[in-house]
Image (cartoon, rainbow, N blue to C red):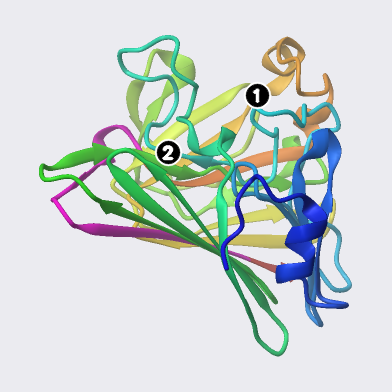
Amino acid sequence: MRYHQAMDAQEVDKRFGVPGVLTFESGPGGLTRASVTTASCSGQMYLYGAHVTGFQPVGHKPVLFVSDATMYQRGKAIRGGVPVCFPWFGPHPSDKAAPSHGPARITDWELAGVDREEDALSLNLSAAFDPYQVDYRVTFGHELSMALAVRNTSESTATFESALHTYLAVGDARQVGITGLSGVEYLDKVDGTKRKTQPDQPITFTGETDRVYVDTGSACVLTDPVIGRQITVDKSGSRSTVIWNPWVDKAAAMGDFGNEEWLEMACIETANAGPNAVALAPGGVHEMSATVTLRDL
């Protein structure tokens, strides 16, 4: 049995809910939200946008950031958590009216099924974006795992970009450091998309930061001395990593983002963007995955 948007949250819960582990309810804006509670974590996910908005291992603070100012309404993306960017990243290359980062994050996805393990739970969702069929599996457990599988249903090669745009919650963005990208070239979108090379030192935030690191499959580790933890974002099937923080002026200019919330977040995005766009043969399948894990300092 699959979920279709015509069902209300109560009916979805009757068909897919697991007492004490998985419930579906009508969240803000009437959007159907899944709430997960396992022996290892709690989490939340909206079927709108297949959007993960919460992941919190037992005994720890929340790992994901979601803006208090986000607009929970169709046609607008949820600000924070893990938006799914597909089949393009950023503005559409030719259509200014097309939604930023593609339609995936503003689409109602179908719930195809739920798999339960002893201390983890997976939600399987799907959506179609011509000419692609996309299947997305999100597993809440000791770690948060997300796998996006794209199949080209057409009879010709099709090229797409994708990203799992992960917003991480931090104690103070000015004090975190991100390692794993030393020596990697990046496109600096704050400086005219100039191509630069990351020095052999942690990435730190001292102003607006928007960088697309290319040709890298490396894991990244965010060290947060304020909260006292490290968050690792490992990945596969991804050749780009995006590092983003809007800083003061851009945060103030966004209507769905609090003026001071830039202090509370840092994005490490698992992606295939720009020069790492994926050319997929007819009938071909490409899978990109990201795994978020946590450890105390």
- Above or below, 229 against 39 in this view is above
Asked whether, in this view, residue 82 is left or right of residue 285, the answer is: right
- Range covered by the magenta-colored residues: 273-292
Q: Amino acid at mark 2?
A: Phe
Residue at 71 percent across and 90 percent down: it is 118
Residue at 50 percent across and 38 percent down: it is 104
Which secondary structure lies at badge 1?
A: loop
User: Which quadrant of the view contains residue 199?
Assistant: top left
Q: Is 6 in front, or is 125?
A: 6
Residue identifier under label 2: 86
Residue identifier under label 1: 246
Residue 120 visible here = yes
Q: Is 196 in front, or is 105?
A: 105
Q: Position of residue 4 (x, y in %)?
A: 60, 51
Looking at the image, is mark 1 or mark 2 earlier in the sequence? 2
How far, Cα to Cα, is label 1 from label 2?
Answer: 21 Å
Asked whether, in this view, residue 183 is left or right of residue 101, the answer is: left
Quadrant (top left/top right/bottom left/bottom right) for the C terminus: bottom right
Asked whether, in this view, residue 262 is left or right of residue 201, the answer is: right
Residue at 86 percent across and 32 percent down: it is 68
